[in-house]
């Protein structure tokens, strides 16, 4: 099975399960916000460094204003792949997160990671626009 197909199915299940278990977040995501799903893939030589810094990155992100959910999990099938699910209150919160990451230690240690993301924005009328 191709990694891409597996990840698409995994994200669909993970996102639905996460939102179902968190109804407050689900209601907020359905009305406004930015939702990012995808994965990062790192080289075998950089995997240990990523693992060492991931918990701090998650903690820092969850403390950001406007962060509704932030999950990063190492794949059981490939330990160099980390699935990502992010939800931010609005575009400004998402952009603030992106700016912080660029100048952070996490941004430095993960600079070579392959990032494959799908980003959806939702306005107050619940329209969805893929970025």
Image (cartoon, rainbow, N blue to C red):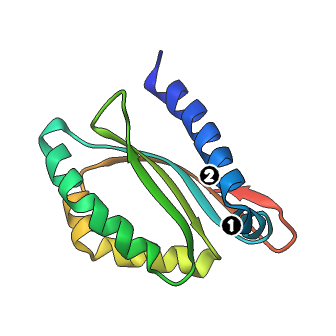
Q: Which residue is mark 2?
A: 18
Quarter assignment of residue 83: top left
Identity of the residue furthest to the right in this view? 125
Kind of element beneath mark 1? helix
Other residues around mark 2 within 10 Å, as few (<14) / some (14–19) / many (≥20) = some
- Residue drawn at point x = 41 percent, y = 72 percent: 61
Image location of residue 73, percent across then percent down: 40, 47
- Residue drawn at point x = 64 percent, y = 75 percent: 89
Toward the viewer: 72 or 41?
Answer: 72
Toward the viewer: 114 or 29?
Answer: 29
Quarter assignment of residue 92: bottom right
Kind of element beneath mark 2? helix
Other residues around mark 1 within 10 Å, as few (<14) / some (14–19) / many (≥20) = some
Image location of residue 66, percent across then percent down: 57, 80
Q: Which residue is mark 1?
A: 25
| Residue 55 shown left or right of residue 9 in the figure | left
């Amino acid at each position: 099975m191709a990694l891409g197909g597996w990840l698409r199915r995994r994200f669909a299940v993970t996102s639905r399960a996460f939102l179902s278990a968190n109804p407050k977040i689900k209601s907020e995501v359905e009305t406004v916000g930015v939702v990012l799903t995808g994965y990062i893939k790192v080289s075998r030589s950089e995997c240990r460094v990523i693992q060492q810094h991931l918990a701090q990155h998650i903690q820092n992100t969850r403390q950001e204003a406007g962060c509704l959910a932030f999950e990063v999990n190492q794949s059981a099938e490939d330990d160099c792949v980390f699935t990502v699910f992010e939800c931010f209150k609005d575009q400004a919160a998402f952009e603030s997160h992106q700016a912080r990451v660029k100048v952070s230690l996490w941004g430095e240690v993960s600079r070579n990671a392959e990032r494959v993301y799908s980003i959806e924005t939702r306005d107050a009328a619940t329209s969805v626009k893929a970025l």
